[in-house]
Image (cartoon, helix red, strand yellow):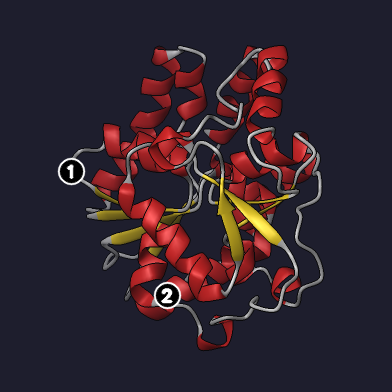
Amino acid sequence: MGKSSFKFHQINSSKKIFNKSFIKESSEIIFMPGCSLSGYNEELILNIYDYLRKHIKNIGITFSCCYRPSLMINDDNSFNKYYKKLNETLTSNNIKEIITACPNCYKTVKANSKNVKVTFLLDVIKEKGLDEFLLNHYKDLDIKFAIQDSCAIRGENSIYESSRYILDSLGIDYVEFEKNRKNSNCCGAIFVDDTKKIGQINRRCSQTNEKHVICYCETCTKSMIQGNKQSIHILDLIFNKEVINKNYFSQKNQSAMQSWKNRYKLNNRRKYE
């Protein structure tokens, strides 16, 4: 994914058909799933939002991009132009808190919208709790996973603890990567140059002998799959019916076109009342 692909992503992500927000006048908290997760699985996002609505009164949702890819290619002018739109959405709706499902969104919004509290979704799930039927749901699963820590939230101890607390509650058997938590290596997605990216993906994947990897970043999940690991997102274990029914434990490769289609459907399929 070279610079042109990053620019294409940012231009399209700024279009209204892909970054709508559904916010009531009474909403002070919004959910921001992020581009990668929204592009992965439409129903997963809807199930997460339904969970949040059960626990948080008048929560809204935004499908805005955080525009971090512009920063990754050192295009500060584009970032400032695009991020201004997100900041205006937050300000005009008097949003006090954003719940993010994406480590890159978490980092970017936290750094650029100082008046808004930014909370990671796993911290919310740890606080509010899992549905009872999910407790120890996977205890008989004959798979051991390695847990991949995102470099985007390096040093955020609450996220490290929440992810592992949730895995323990689900009954998942997991081990740590050789380098983990604040010492975790990047999955490779930070590199614009494809050769460097593939090299880093392979280096990171070589730091565990486990074939299966659990991530709490969708970009990491895709990188692990590129590195020939069988990988899923931790949210798959909680909100993806196919995974809950133990039909599969690795995401499938998905075309960029399908990802854009999924994002379009999420923005235009229904009202989020």
> Dot 1, how many residues are within 10 Å of its Cα: few (below 14), some (14-19), or many (20+)?
few
Looking at the image, which residue is at 40% across and 14% down?
Answer: 76
In the foreground, 5 or 178: 178
Local crowd at mark 2 within 10 Å, few (<14), some, or many (≥20)? some
* Residue 142 vs residue 217, the one in the foreground: 142
The answer to whether residue 233 is seen in the rendering is yes
Q: Disc 1 residue type?
A: Asn
Residue located farthest toward the bottom when viewing the structure as drawn: 132
- Identify residue type, mark 2: Arg
Q: Can the viewer see residue 270 in this picture?
A: no
Q: Which residue is mark 1?
A: 115
Q: Secondary structure at mark 2?
A: helix
Q: Quadrant of residue 133?
A: bottom right
From the viewer's side, name the closer residue of 143 and 30. 143
Please provide percent x and percent y for residue 4: 66, 14
**Is 46 located above or below residue 89 in the figure?**
below
Foreground residue among 207 and 85: 207
Q: Position of residue 12 (x, y in %)?
A: 61, 31
Tell me what residue is drawn at x 55 percent, y 24 percent: 190
Q: Is residue 120 left or right of residue 195?
A: left
**Considering only order in the chain, which callout, 2 or 1, is on the residue closer to the N terminus?**
2
Whether residue 11 sits left or right of residue 157 in the image: it is right
Q: How many marks?
A: 2
Gap between marks 1 and 2 measured at Cα: 23 Å
Determine whether 189 is above or below 233 in the image.
above
Q: Which residue is mark 2?
A: 53
Work out whether 258 lies above or below 133: above
